[in-house]
Image (tube, rainbow, N blue to C red):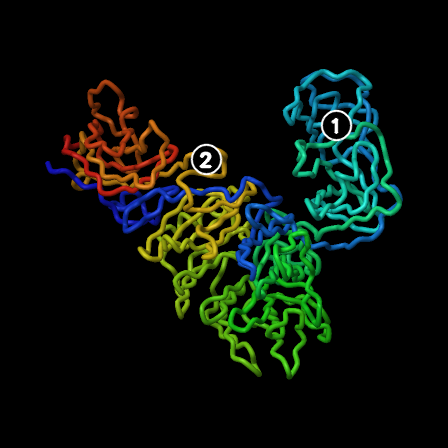
Amino acid sequence: MPLQKLQFRPGVNREGTTLANEGGWFECDKVRFRSGYPEKIGGWAALTYTRYLGICRSLWNWITLKGYNLLGVGTNLKFYIENGGVYYDITPIGDITNPMTNNPFATAYSLLSSGISATATTIPVVSATTFPVTGGYIKIDSEEIRFASKSGNDLVGCTRGVNGTTAATHSVSAPVGCATLTVTDSGHVTETNSFVDYTSVATFGPFTATLMNSNATTHVPSFQMTYLEPNKYTITVTDQDPNSVTYGQYIYSTSATSGGGAAVRADYEIDAGLDIFSFGTGWGTGPWSRGSWGSGYSDASGGIGLQLRLWSQANFGEVLLFAPRNGPIYYWAPGGAGTPDFSTRGVQVTGTEVPDQVNLIMVSDATRICIAFGATSYSFDTPADTFDPMLVRWSVQEDYTDWLPAVTNQAGSYRLSHGSFIVGALQTRQEILVWTDSSIYSMQYLGAPYVWGFTLLADNISIIGPNAMATAAGVTYWMGSDKFYIYSGRVETLPCSLRQYVFEDINFNQSFQFFAGTNEGYSEVWWFYCSSNSTVIDRYVIFNYLDRVWYYGTMDRTAWLDSPLREFPQAATLNNLIVYHEAAVDDGTTNPPSPINSYIQSSDFDIGDGHNYGFVWQIVPDITFDGSTTPAPKFPAVDFIVRPRQNPGAAYGSADAPSVTATTSYAQRSTYNVQQFTELVNTRIRGRQMAFKIECNSLGTQWQLGTPRINVRPDGRR
């Protein structure tokens, strides 16, 4: 009989069974569609292998008047400006420069109370009082050890021989040095995981002023605090000098020493946030709409350090405005001449009636007005300075420091009425779209005296998170709590052939993490989300708005930015890197790069109406490898896999009955390696229905599938 084309409808459909979707694609990973045909997605290359601290949730790109291409990077622990592959820490200072108590530092140091073997995981010491409760690094003789916690005078949960050292036996009374300092500071309240910078530290023990003091000309060392008790915390001490051969190495105490002087100064950075959503207690606790107002924070007035840290960023000219969700507004100015001054920190915006707590900020491109969505009220309101999650406030035109309404300016406010809190906002071509937890508004500039007009576009709709929306080609798309939406002048449901697959395996408790991004070069909108058993982002789903098809896969990303100011889309990864997507063929998060495992599998197809067995004895490939960088002497190649089965409920590969005589079993012969110049593949595959799969996990291979053909004949009836 004539050759049968393996030609399937573009896009992936998981709304029915594999047999009901005959003629379509059913599964995929790391694959996109272009002009109706599947191909491997582009790889990614690391911007730099230097890693930032924390999990990045926000990226923002702009160019200064001097031509510096800068990237704002907001993480749960820090805020950075990236330039030329270097991350400059501009995290704002919170509690500012008060003298500390006399001699605030004490080293963690003791002696072994008994000898230990090379495999012991409990380290007994004479006194563990000064050792951190939450664990840390110690050194005994030449061995470095990581302990998880302490119990009485025992350091427990030990990992032996870390940092390239060798586990060994140690005798009683051997010195046990620790890479931590205990700090007493009665003048400040400290938070776990927050950071502190020391600007004046006396030399004592093994910890020198060089290791502790800030030096703005080369680096600004920050030390992450571990909370012990009120007014007391520990810090882990490392060599902070990037020019040192021991940069990043732990420094261990060699004696029980205390001191530091009477005039030590410490700058406490703003409280760190969490990297995932967690349940707490109090006002507004829980994910969206669970509790009063549904803000998702444990405390209305001071919860920014208790829940997932999200940032919003915007430009006021070349000045960067940025704000943590449920926190104040900060600014960073690059400086008036020459190279931007990256040693300066972000500073809280102060002025007239500036809100000290916002959910997110934006700067209107057309009017140069700074807008806050969810904000504290005015000082003259009753009650004054109360956070209102439904309040929209905006500044005077051309001045982000003046928010006081007057008849001579355009500052003002408006409280939305549909919903209980503002989830997010997005600036589009002629309007600003504002989502609450139950509706969407259009916000348009009217000019004086009303300034902004608000129109309810749709009610009884949903949005799954504050960053789950994106605009592409003048159309806005977003992810709801149970479906996708589109706005192109009116709000509509976006048909999705993966709706059941996405929303039946999703972790709604982590919806704050979910985000959308565009990939304009391929006409795509991406959504990243957590599967039901994951607390971190591990999946994506893509809508191709040119071909109007869907596809999906697995990937860990925490932020995305498709900026025209840089050549490729940028994304942040879980392992603290910024990568350029579509800039490579392989996975550039490793050095050297690793291969990307890509595949796509069709739904089942049968012979006739399935009343005959089919016997496939030849495959004629049709595939290109344009763009491949496979290192010689290898050639780019993929695997063609034909997966037969007897009935829809049968496992793949179980349909080889009656048996076909062959030198090898069906399971061994179902996969066929195809290279660029492979003309014909001889096969021996038998089944009532079959699925076709193409898979590749080799370095440097880029592929696009055409229309392969199979030589199949009826092979009996059962």
Sort mark 2 into few (<14), some (14-19) or many (20+) by Cα contacts within 10 Å: some
Q: Amino acid at mark 2?
A: Pro
Residue 362: give x, y in percent of width and height: 56, 65
The residue positioned 28% from the left and 38% from the top of the image is: 648
User: Can residue 155 be seen from the camera position used here?
Assistant: yes
The residue positioned 49% from the left and 39% from the top of the image is: 589
Q: Amino acid at mark 1?
A: Leu
Residue 57: give x, y in percent of width and height: 56, 51
Q: Nearer the viewer, residue 213 or 585?
A: 213
In terms of image quadrants, where is residue 310? Answer: bottom right
User: Can residue 466 be seen from the camera position used here?
Assistant: no
Q: Which mark is residue 467?
A: none
Residue 81's place in the image compared with 534, above or below, is below
Q: Is residue 603 left or right of residue 137?
A: left
Nearer to us: label 2 or label 1: 2
Identify the residue under disc 2. Answer: 593
Identify the residue under disc 1. Answer: 155
The outermost residue toward the front is 338
**SS type, badge 1:** strand
In terms of image quadrants, where is residue 125? Answer: top right
Q: Nearer the viewer, residue 295 or 310?
A: 310
